[in-house]
Image (tube, rainbow, N blue to C red):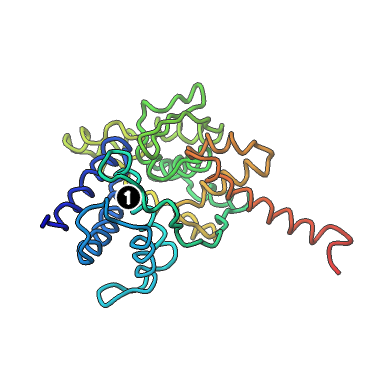
Amino acid sequence: MPDAGGVLHRAVRIYLDHLTVERGLAGNTLASYRRDLTRYVDALAAAGITDLGQVSEADVAGHLARLREGDEEHPPLAAASAARAIVAVRGLHRFAARDGLAATDPTREVKPPALPRRLPKALDVDQVFRLLDVPAGDGPPALRDKALLEFLYGTGARISEAVGCATDDLDLDAGTVALHGKGGRTRVVPVGAYACQALQAYLVRGRPALAAAASAATARSTGGAVFLNARGGRLSRQGAWAILREAAARAGVPASPHTLRHSYATHLLDGGADIRVVQELLGHASVTTTQVYTLVTVERLREIYATSHPRAMA
């Protein structure tokens, strides 16, 4: 009798190798897929299933139900976590059917749990301006923090894209930057005039002083990063988030790692930008991902209508 666990785990390894090499998924995403798929194939093996070709739609639906209910070894999963796990399972079976590891895909009719549509939290323009005005002074850290916050709001970059940005990616004369996003995709986006000014001041008067603190080994490892930490190394995502969090606390506004990106998208749409242009600027693979921001503007229109129209309230 075949080693069920061995055959199934081998299929998972092949799929994860595909995601790593062909799709360029981030390490954290791959770790989540590996965890979810290991639990899935362990459950299949325990049920006596020896390969993916034996899996039925009922097996997949049963796994989803067990994720939601929990068992002796696992607590019940929330809808979002169960949905993520089933997306991984569906990806595995689609890959297996396409690459001849199984004849059919039993997950076609199994839908992830429906999730509530959550509106991204965006700051209003005055709140953003208060946040951007927090870093003050001519010291290297203040110049860096000012440039970082202006960069995040002026480009809509993810924090990971900002800290991954190299000086060669910037063209301040043209007012553009190349951002290296998810899945190895690169996009060129405009950089606003305020962000360009802040970056220019930092690159001339701030970054050289920070770089001077680096050891030879650290200097080689930065890869020409735009944003440096106090030791002259590349600023980490955690370091960038700490800068944003401190500025938000001082400005008295709520913040998360995506606050300025959400605000960037919302303010563009409020200003009349086409949703497909915003999709390109954000680096979303699908316009559906961007459409959630239109809900924010609809909510704002409702508020304005409710307080402004003489017949809005009964």
Q: Quadrant of the N terminus?
A: bottom left
Q: Secondary structure at mark 1?
A: helix
Residue denoted by label 1: 29
**Displayed quadrant of residue 41:** bottom left
The spot of residue 170 in percent (x, y) is: 42, 27
- Residue in the image at 43% along x and 57% along y: 110
In the visual, does 120 lie left or right of 166?
A: right
Number of residues whose C-alpha sits closer than 10 Å to that of mark 1, classed few (under 14), some (14–19) or many (20 or more): few
Front-most of 87 and 278? 87
Q: Nearer the viewer, residue 295 or 99?
A: 99
Which corner quadrant holds the C terminus? bottom right
Residue 175, compared with residue 271, is above or below; it is: above
**Number of numbered discs overlaid on the protein picture:** 1
Query: What residue is at 22 percent from the left and 48 percent from the top?
Result: 11
Percent position (x, y) of residue 53? 27, 50
Image height of 243 relative to 283, above or below: below
Q: Position of residue 244 (x, y in %)?
A: 44, 52
Residue lying furthest right: 310
Q: Residue 177 sits in which quadrant? A: top left
Most distant residue in the bottom direction:
72
Query: Which residue is drawn at the image coordinates 48% and 42% (left, top)?
Result: 152
Q: Amino acid at mark 1?
A: Thr
Coordinates of residue 52 in the picture (x, y in percent): 26, 52
Pick whichever, 232 or 157, lies toward us. Answer: 157
Quarter of the rendering containing residue 192: top right
Residue 89 vs residue 203, the one in the foreground: 89
Residue at position x 53%, y 60% in the image = 254
Q: Is residue 54 left or right of residue 148?
A: left
